[in-house]
Amino acid sequence: MKKSPLLIVFSLLIVLSLFLSSCGGEEGDYYAEEPATDEYLTEEPYSTEAPVAEEAGAEVPAAGVPGEVVYDLGFNPVDNGFSFSNYGDDIPATNLTADEVRRMFGDQVCSRLDGNVCTLTPPAEQWMEQINGAMAGGHCEGMAVLSLMMYTNQISPSDFGGSTASELDINDEALQREIAYWWATQTVAPTYTSVIKGTPMEILEIVQQMDANGETYSIGIYKEDGSGGHAITPFGVEDKGNGLFAILVYDNNYPGETRELYVDSRDNTWLYEASINPQVQSELYTGNADTQTLDLTPTSSRLDTQQCPFCDGSGISSVGGKLASPSLQGSQINQIFLDGEGHILITDDNGNRLGYVDGKIVNEIPGATYSAYRMEASGNAPEPIYSLPADLDVTVSIDGSDLTEETLTDLIMIGAGFSIGVEGIYLEPGQVDTAYFYPSEETIAYETEADESPFIVIGVENPEAEADYYFEVQGADIQGGGIITVYLDTKAGDLLINAEKLNNEGFFDFYLTRITDELEEEFAAEEIALQEGAIVYVNYAEWTDANPEGMYFGVDLDGDGTIDEEYVVDDSQ
């Protein structure tokens, strides 16, 4: 008889309620109460008739004794988990620094090295800023991974002042940075290209193959719309009887407790009750063989030097993960980050879409992928990282339709050797702005109908040139709406600010950082006129601190390609 999904969830909730109060015992004593009685396990859908999984061709484990722990890694949340809860920006934590970025990708991320001090390239600095901003939503990925690596002696707790993870102090900056490092591995290859997705029963089987002296995994769980990612640490499997199994996990939102993720072999479904923290109402995460909302990340994929998505000429390629995307193998990508509330929808020139449509993520762009963060502490999980083929021009809608109040939002694209984006967008409820990215031309155009004064930011790594550069066109007035376009012409050494499609005149401030092997220099200028219909040329390549004449600005007043005005701007610092 075919089982109703609603009855399945209802019955699982009954079983779940019986076991929630029993989690958190000592190692080898996973619960205090007796297993669920036959009264519940024989109700629909827990009857003894043929399991649905057999009908679907899924493998069903041999029957065990209800309550028997059929797999045990030996990890104990009381001793081997952290004594503090998952955290976001609710404490003054230090996340990635230049040292962690260099550790992850090597010296190629440094514009200059002064002894052992790394000055990051502008794209590397921008990437670090985006990743650190995302951690405001929680550090569960880093905590799930690091606690497991400490248990398997791949990382020593003694380096942070204790003999086990439970003895460590969250206020230790070195520990905070270590948690941030392992959190960040989820965003790059070969870690994210090695993620194993599968049916609940396939995930259950792989968990039982973990070896403290071999491969281990963290579990990622997601809501069915692809949001709400959370990371937990599996360490055991318990047979609940009648085809129901519990994956025993350490959930860093619940220090010291043993939690249970339920897998029903008869219809290949899973269920987990999770909360962003114990003081917040929990939510039910569910899935089946089709949702692909349960995955495993091999610890081994995190151990090698990670592949740098923003280093010039590097790109990302797969290293053979079970379900690695063929579209990313050996290809360069650009990553798009939204830092703030709202959603984005990316569209290519053929009308293919990637992003949120009617509350769910769609992906129609060939070769594109997205990766939801696993974090869950604040309840405000950020937009996923969207990855696109590097040669693709795209239009990005920044949608505030679901907002209830104004929010500050940044939109950034980062690729091999460059970063480009818009920061400081004040997005109102119902407001929809648009950004146009032309990465091969290092060009961005930003369109709004609102009064805005955002920052246009561009970073560029120039391995063959004398210097790397970071630019900010700060507070560019877009009064009454319009389009502002910023274009970097590295051959001519000019930064172009195109106001041809602005509706009114305004002003902007200009900021530049120039990094060479020997030094780091800065230039700033304020109140630069931005005339409607004009194009401003900033001749940045001619400037150094040693140049007493300042920086040359040229203005094409009517967009005909001829400089009508030219003047020198002094450094205002």
Image (spheres, rainbow, N blue to C red):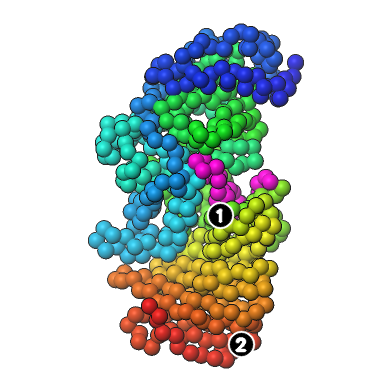
Quadrant of the snapshot with the C terminus: bottom left
Report x, y in % for residue 203. Answer: 54, 28
Above or below — where is 271 with respect to 64?
A: below
Q: Which of marks 2 and 1 is nearer the N terminus?
A: 1
The span shown in magenta is 359-388
Q: Which mark is residue 380?
A: none
Q: Is residue 421 magenta?
A: no
Q: Between residue 121 and residue 497, name the one nearer to us.
A: 497
Q: Is residue 376 magenta?
A: yes
Report x, y in % for residue 404. Answer: 65, 52
Q: Name the residue under label 2.
A: 557
Is residue 179 rendered to the left or right of residue 420?
left
Callout 1: SS? loop
Q: Do the residues labelled 2 and 1 touch (CB within 8 Å)?
A: no
Camera-near label (2 vs 1) is: 1
Q: How crowded is mark 1: few (under 14 residues within 10 Å), some or many (20 or more)?
A: many
User: Identity of the amino acid at label 1?
Assistant: Gly
Quadrant of the snapshot with the N terminus: top right
Report x, y in % for residue 134. Answer: 49, 50
